[in-house]
Amino acid sequence: MEANPIANLNIRSVCSHLVAALWALLVLLAGCGKDKALDDAYVNYRLDVVTYAGTADGAAVFDYYGRGDSLPVSLLTTWTHDVGAKVGQRLLLRYGLDAMPAGGNAQVKAYGVSAIVSDTLRVSSLAPATMGADPVRLRSVWRTGPYLNVRCEVEYTGQHHRFGLVAEDATLDSDTIVCHIIHSLGGFTAKQWRELYGSFLIDEALARKTCRVLRVVVDTDVVRPASTTYDFEL
């Protein structure tokens, strides 16, 4: 992995895509014409971070990775709207499925798709606090296949935020690679808290022969300030 500074990620754009996706979802539901479809979309659904894999027969295909090293499942959906994403981009999918298979393909009914922060693990020699030390409200952090996923709340400003996963370059060849969740408001005034999902490709870290643990440090969490370290055995 090359040493790259963390990118300025456009959270304002992510929120705009989310609003557009939710509007498309409402339009789709309004056209269903059946109470059962409305009920399923709101109460009988899965909500997963998935990878956009393109289209097949005019419908969107998403790859779902379970916890740890589970085999991926290709979700063949009914979603024929423009996803507005590039192949390989991580998204949040709301869909109906009775039971997730252990691998292969699964036909699912899509209810909506939303943009999230989708990036790769960055590497830096800078002190984490210099890249961003604004608070987050961490809800969950978990690994699915080659991705490290985060669900949290961040303060919204209406401007570009800096949010990402950065590894300490000095730890790359050790048995424990130490990473930090970075969040910076860029000096703009915070207005309110908003939910944020992020997913980061960590395949290069997983491929390192010396790596046994991916350690994620979230030392700006205001929900559990005493619990800042999360270890994922590889």
Image (spheres, rainbow, N blue to C red):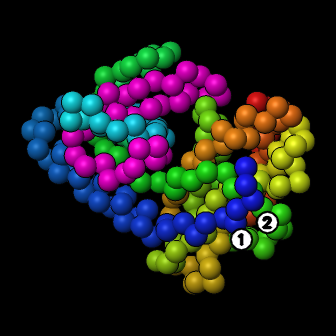
In percent of the image, x 49 and y 68: which residue is there? Answer: 10
Q: Is residue 204 above or below residue 130?
A: above
Position of residue 59 relative to residue 16, above or below, is above
Residue depicted at 61% across the width and 76% down the height = 185
Q: Position of residue 131 (x, y in %)?
A: 73, 71
Tell me if residue 67 can be seen.
Answer: yes
Secondary structure at badge 2 equals helix
Rendering coords of residue 44 (x, y %): 34, 31
Q: Residue at x 18, y 45 (%)?
A: 28
Whether residue 155 is visible to the viewer of this picture, yes or no, is no
Near mark 1 (Cα within 10 A), the count class, few <14, some 14-19 or many ≥20, is many
Q: Main secondary structure of the magenta part?
A: loop
Residue annotated with mark 2: 128
Amino acid on which disc 2 is placed:
Pro
Of the residues shown, which amino acid type is indicated by label 1?
A: Gly
Q: CA distance from mark 2 to mark 1?
A: 7 Å
The foreground one among 144 and 52 is 52
Dot 1: element: loop
The image quadrant that residue 63 belongs to is top left
Instruction: Give coordinates of residue 26: x percent, y percent.
Output: 22, 51
**What's the magenta region?**
61-90
Q: Which residue, as the protein is rendered here, is positioned at the far front?
A: 2
Dots 2, 1 in contact, CB < 8 A: yes
At a point 56% along the width and 79% down the height, the residue shown is 190
